[in-house]
């Protein structure tokens, strides 16, 4: 060939080869071109309460725990259980003894192997009253044998129903049969903590330099109220499948400032300021994310004597519930894809199908007419009601809308009582309200995490609703292979007796940069494991 | 002067003790506690948790233990909300940050405010004067929680010159915006105060005498007019200092600096008793100290004042 063509050929080959050498690499499964720097930066509303898995109290803190530690099981992108430190488990005939087989290649970041003893230590630590963990009650949710007396300090922690048969076999004994026990092992308060580090450093064991982790990342920098940085832990057993190298969390209290910094490119992910989802979705359709979440928003009634006596009549409660136009709340006020609720448990809950309740199938006009009829039947006119809610623009707007609906349709005079968070919790928790705003998020992906609130003995039943049939249905459901029929019956009872007004089911709204891939959008508990994320080239 | 310092220090001790008692009582009278949460602890468990932190003891005993802890070990207690940290650690991290940008804001406000005020006074009814008055009205109208996001919008998003927040060990790029946001409204009010004070002093007889003697105008202003004109400004500096500290809460929230101001309000919402007490005490101590400094400067500026 002539010289010009040869030069052209060599130049082309050379530049292609050079580019290939300089490229950052491609994703082993999807083949996408990866970005050169694998760093993910996201926004935190506030400093987290603790990096210690047994002491952490907040949702943001549990993200740190999921990235730095690993429990028995993890969740995949859809929320199904997959092996973590545990490979599998077997259950005895009556669902009271679970035996977990642990992998033998799990290691702590200081080289020590992860053993069944680590779980025994951390679960005992969680239950121990001396630890004073805010999640100590989760041990009872798990249903471990002797949980009650151990938590109260009446029995030693060694009596708790968890034992290490050998280094790689963990045996759990439950107080009563619980078919869904395995689901509770993804909760971060059950994650192992390194006994030797905790004993050596005390409360300082979670500081960078002291901290020992068994998860994909380790804390290298922590400036409270400003930033924290987690970096790849190469002793993690699955490290070769981790693509993201560094995770930076920036504390930005003001959501609008966070949005500005996201737009300026300082963040890869941030929350959507209240009421702005619609506009942001229009401006950034690929970045504004909106997915169902395992949480419900509702108004419980105070069913005790300290409440409004008119509310003792179920017709009044039904009328108040029917008169609310939930579509106005979800489509006009919140505008972020929330789902109108006529029952308590969200449809997104695993193995749960939302039962059809009659009033949910009517049109709003039909509901309004029925509401007026019910109020007239009950003989209630000019009812005075007080709605209690905690300080927040969104709660205020919803309360105003509902009070207007009640005024216009039923002639109810509503006073709005707005209290600061802890004061509101005290007021609601001591039954000093008539109707209050409440929200509840599930602790595990099964309907009982919601419906147990309706149990008369539940500590979270602020309205003190009591129904013996509901109590026995809930108890029976714990041992049924498929409890859906009981759950359906309970939801129907709730829809009939209306101790709470279900209003909507939450959606998670946030902005995510398009270069970030691997986000588990379908996981309704928002259990993100950041080691599954990776960044592609823009 | 030494008498003044001694007297003030002696008075400070009972003042701070009263501050401790009043704050303690107010704190504990608010409904809810550090462990009140949406998923409440069963009562027996809550009792144990509170016992661990000494919250089950009678209030006077808790107060006594608190004061003893500070005096003997300089230990301000644990944080109930941030389990991994103590109040001492929070101070050690937050105080230098707040003092850094607080002092810079203060100095900037005073220097620029005085300069603008004097300039506007001596060039009364010129464009300099009108500009200064307009600027000070605008700056007083824009509170720091409006200034902050606007500055971030301009300098981080539009121009890309400065980071939108954080502290990063105090590198200058991170200090600029918080200082501007905090100092602007005080700069403006100091300028206005200085201007009107200077205008009044310039009408006095002794200034007329100085000019009649043939002194250069710069000497008249700087050597004779400035000191008396400063007096109202100096009086104002005491409250300015306090407003800056409370204003730093907003600066911390907007710019994520990690300073102490944020803990002030946050601790109240969290019922984080030890942090609340610690920050209140610190603030009280700083205010007392600063008022003393202001009085000393006052005495130096106006020789007629005797304590």
Image (cartoon, helix red, strand yellow):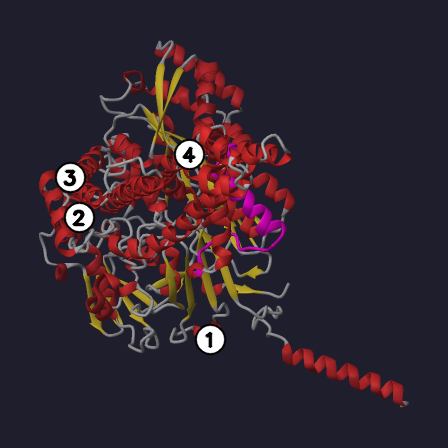
Quarter of the view holding residue A218: bottom left
Nearer the observer: mark 1 or 2; the answer is 2
Task: Answer whether labels 1 and 2 touch (C-beta < 8 Å).
Answer: no
When the figure is inspected, residue A115 is found, relative to residue A46, above or below; the finding is: below
Return the x and y of residue A476 as percentages of the image width and height.
26, 43
Task: Answer whether labels 2 and 3 touch (C-beta < 8 Å).
Answer: no
| Residue in view at x 16 percent, y 45 percent | B50
Quarter of the view holding residue A226: bottom left
Question: Which circle marks residue A392 in the picture?
Answer: 4
Q: Which residue is mark 1?
A: A240
The kind of secondary structure element at disc 3 is helix
Distance Cα–Cα, label 1 vs label 2: 42 Å
Range of the magenta residues? B140-168
Question: Which circle marks residue B274 in the picture?
Answer: none
The kind of secondary structure element at disc 4 is loop
Label 1 vs 4, first from the N-terminus = 1
């Amino acid at each position: 060939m002539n010289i010009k063509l040869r030069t052209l050929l060599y130049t082309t080959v050379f530049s292609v080869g050079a580019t290939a050498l300089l490229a950052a690499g491609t994703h082993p499964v999807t083949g996408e071109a990866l970005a050169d720097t694998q760093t993910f930066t996201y926004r935190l509303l506030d400093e987290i309460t603790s990096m210690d898995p047994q002491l952490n109290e907040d949702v943001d803190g549990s993200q740190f725990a999921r990235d730095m530690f690993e429990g028995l099981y993890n969740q995949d992108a859809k929320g199904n259980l997959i092996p973590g430190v545990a490979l599998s488990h077997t259950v005895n005939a009556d669902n009271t003894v679970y035996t977990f087989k642990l992998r033998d290649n799990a290691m702590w970041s200081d080289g020590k192997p992860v053993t069944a003893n680590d779980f025994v230590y951390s679960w005992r630590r969680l239950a121990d009253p001396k630890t004073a963990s805010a999640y100590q009650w989760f041990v009872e949710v798990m249903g471990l044998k002797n949980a009650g007396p151990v938590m109260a300090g009446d029995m030693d922690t060694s009596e708790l129903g968890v034992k290490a048969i050998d280094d790689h076999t963990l045996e759990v004994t439950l107080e009563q049969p619980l078919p869904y026990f395995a689901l509770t092992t993804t909760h971060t308060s059950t994650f192992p903590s390194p006994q030797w580090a905790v004993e050596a450093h005390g409360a300082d064991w979670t500081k960078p330099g002291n901290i020992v982790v068994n998860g994909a990342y380790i804390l290298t920098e922590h400036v409270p109220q400003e930033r924290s940085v987690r970096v790849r832990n190469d002793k993690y057993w699955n490290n070769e499948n981790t693509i993201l190298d560094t995770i930076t969390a920036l504390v930005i209290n003001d959501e609008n400032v966070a949005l500005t910094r996201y737009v300026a490119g300082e963040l890869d992910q941030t929350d959507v300021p209240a009421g702005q989802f619609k506009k942001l979705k229009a401006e950034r359709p690929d970045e504004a994310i909106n997915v169902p979440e395992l949480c419900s928003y509702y108004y419980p009634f105070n069913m005790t004597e300290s409440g409004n006596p008119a509310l003792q009549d179920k017709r009044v409660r039904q009328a108040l519930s029917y008169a609310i136009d939930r579509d106005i709340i979800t489509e006009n006020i919140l505008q972020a894809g929330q789902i109108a609720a006529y029952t308590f448990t969200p449809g997104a809950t695993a193995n749960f199908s939302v039962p059809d309740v009659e009033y949910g199938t009517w049109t709003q006009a039909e509901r309004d007419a029925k509401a007026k009829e019910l109020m007239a039947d009950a003989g209630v006119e000019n009812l005075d009601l007080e709605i209690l809610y905690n300080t927040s623009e969104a709660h205020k707007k919803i309360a105003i809308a509902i009070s207007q609906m009640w005024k216009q349709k039923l002639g109810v005079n509503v006073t709005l009582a707005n209290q600061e968070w802890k004061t509101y919790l005290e007021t609601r928790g001591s039954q000093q309200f008539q109707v209050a705003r409440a929200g509840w998020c599930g602790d595990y992906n099964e309907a009982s995490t919601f419906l147990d609130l309706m149990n008369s003995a539940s500590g979270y039943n602020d309205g003190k609703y009591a129904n013996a049939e509901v109590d026995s249905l809930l108890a029976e459901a714990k041992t049924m292979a498929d409890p859906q029929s009981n759950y359906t019956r309970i939801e129907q009872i709730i829809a009939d007796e209306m101790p709470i007004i279900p209003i909507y089911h939450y959606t998670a709204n946030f902005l995510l940069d398009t270069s970030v891939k691997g986000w588990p959008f379908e996981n309704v508990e928002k259990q993100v494991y950041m080691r599954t994320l990776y960044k592609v080239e823009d | 002067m030494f008498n003044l310092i001694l007297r003030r220090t002696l008075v400070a001790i009972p003042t701070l003790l009263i501050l401790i008692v009043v704050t303690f009582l107010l704190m504990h009278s608010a409904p809810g506690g550090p462990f009140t949460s949406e998923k409440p602890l069963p009562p027996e468990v809550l009792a144990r948790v509170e016992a661990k932190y000494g919250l089950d003891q009678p209030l006077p005993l808790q107060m006594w233990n608190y004061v003893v802890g500070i005096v003997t070990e300089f230990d301000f207690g644990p944080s109930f909300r941030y389990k991994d940290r103590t109040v001492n650690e929070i101070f050690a991290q937050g105080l230098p940050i707040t003092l850094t940008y607080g002092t810079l804001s203060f100095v900037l406000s005073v220097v620029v405010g005085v300069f603008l005020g004097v300039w506007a006074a001596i060039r009364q009814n010129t464009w300099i004067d009108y500009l200064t008055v307009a600027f000070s009205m605008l700056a007083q109208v824009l509170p720091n929680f409006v200034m902050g996001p606007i500055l971030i919008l301009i300098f981080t998003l539009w121009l890309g010159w400065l980071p939108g927040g954080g502290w990063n060990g105090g590198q200058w790029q991170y200090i600029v915006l918080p200082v501007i946001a905090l100092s602007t409204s005080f700069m403006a009010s100091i300028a206005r105060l200085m201007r009107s004070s200077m205008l009044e002093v310039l009408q006095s007889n002794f200034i007329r005498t100085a000019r009649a003697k043939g002194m250069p105008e710069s000497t008249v202003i700087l050597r004779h007019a400035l000191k008396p004109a400063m007096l109202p400004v100096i009086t104002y500096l005491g409250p300015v200092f306090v407003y800056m500290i409370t204003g730093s809460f907003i600066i911390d929230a907007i710019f994520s600096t990690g300073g102490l101001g944020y803990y002030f309000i946050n601790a109240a919402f969290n019922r984080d008793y030890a942090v609340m007490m610690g920050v209140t005490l610190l603030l009280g101590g700083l205010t007392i100290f600063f008022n003393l400094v202001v009085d000393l400067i006052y005495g130096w500026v106006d020789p007629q004042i005797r304590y």
